[in-house]
Image (cartoon, rainbow, N blue to C red):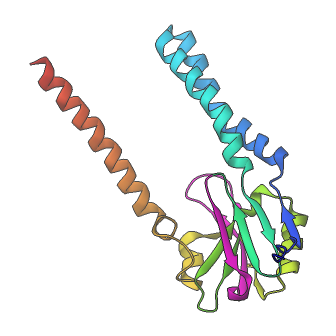
Amino acid sequence: MHPQPPSASLVLRPDRSRVWAGLVVAGVPLVLLLVGALLAGATPLAVGVLVVAGVCAVIVPVLAGSGRVEVTDQDITVKEFFRKRPVLRARAARVVRARLVPLRGPVMDTVFVLDAHGAPLVRIPAYKYRSAEIDRLVHVLGLPCDVPDRPVTGPELSSRYPHMLGFAERRPVVTALVVAGGAVAFVVLVGVIAVISIL
């Protein structure tokens, strides 16, 4: 007989009401852009905005609603839309639950499961779940839990846990400047190519 897989001692699914609320907030700029395009008589732009809005209305809820978390005696698994990431529970040594302040946007409640060396094993976007479920997750894991007493930025969190965040979150301003510079360079390049093609 084959051994039966362990039953999940805890399963978390994203809170759909939060997903839809986020979608509504994200859709406001598209609606304003659509209204502006219609008032200006820019039909092609309005059609483009409608196409983008339609694609987002399908894809965003699917992606935002993915992220089921399962905890068994052996594993901690985050099932996302494109991948499944199981981690041996025995490797987990500590939990950090922080309210991360991004460069732009709302504060995001986030749970990190770290190994004995402080390296991240699992990152869970806790803002997608009900707070009581995240409390239950921390309780089931039964690990020491650090909770900063206030919202923290990426650089602040990195100063305490150096290996926990990627470069973009450790250096958000530098990342934003690089992205903006790349966008400007792309626009200039397109403009130069357009001018050359006309001449």
State the residue in front, 187 or 163: 163
Quadrant of residue 150 within the rendered picture: bottom right
Quadrant of residue 74 within the rendered picture: bottom right
Q: At 47% across and 64% down in the image, what residue appears?
A: 168
Q: At 83% across and 51% down in the image, what residue appears?
A: 15
Residue farthest along the bottom direction in this orientation: 116
Residue 134 lies, with reference to residue 65, above or below; the image says below
Q: Position of residue 149 (x, y in %)?
A: 75, 78
Residue 37 lies, with reference to residue 1, above or below; the image says above
Residue 84 lies, with reference to residue 148, above or below; the image says above
Q: Position of residue 198 (x, y in %)?
A: 14, 18
Q: Position of residue 114 (x, y in %)?
A: 65, 82
Question: Does the stretch in magenta take in 196?
Answer: no
Q: At 50% across and 10% down in the image, what residue appears?
A: 43
In the picture, which quadrant includes the N terminus?
bottom right
Q: Is residue 85 visible?
A: yes
Residue farthest along the top direction in this orientation: 41
Q: Position of residue 164 (x, y in %)?
A: 57, 77
Horizontally, is 133 left or right of 126 in the view? right
User: Exactly how many numbered labels are in the figure?
Assistant: 0
In the picture, which quadrant includes the C terminus?
top left
Q: Is residue 109 visible?
A: no
Question: Does the stretch in magenta take in 90?
Answer: yes
State the residue in front, 81 or 173: 81
Chain part drawn in magenta = 82-109
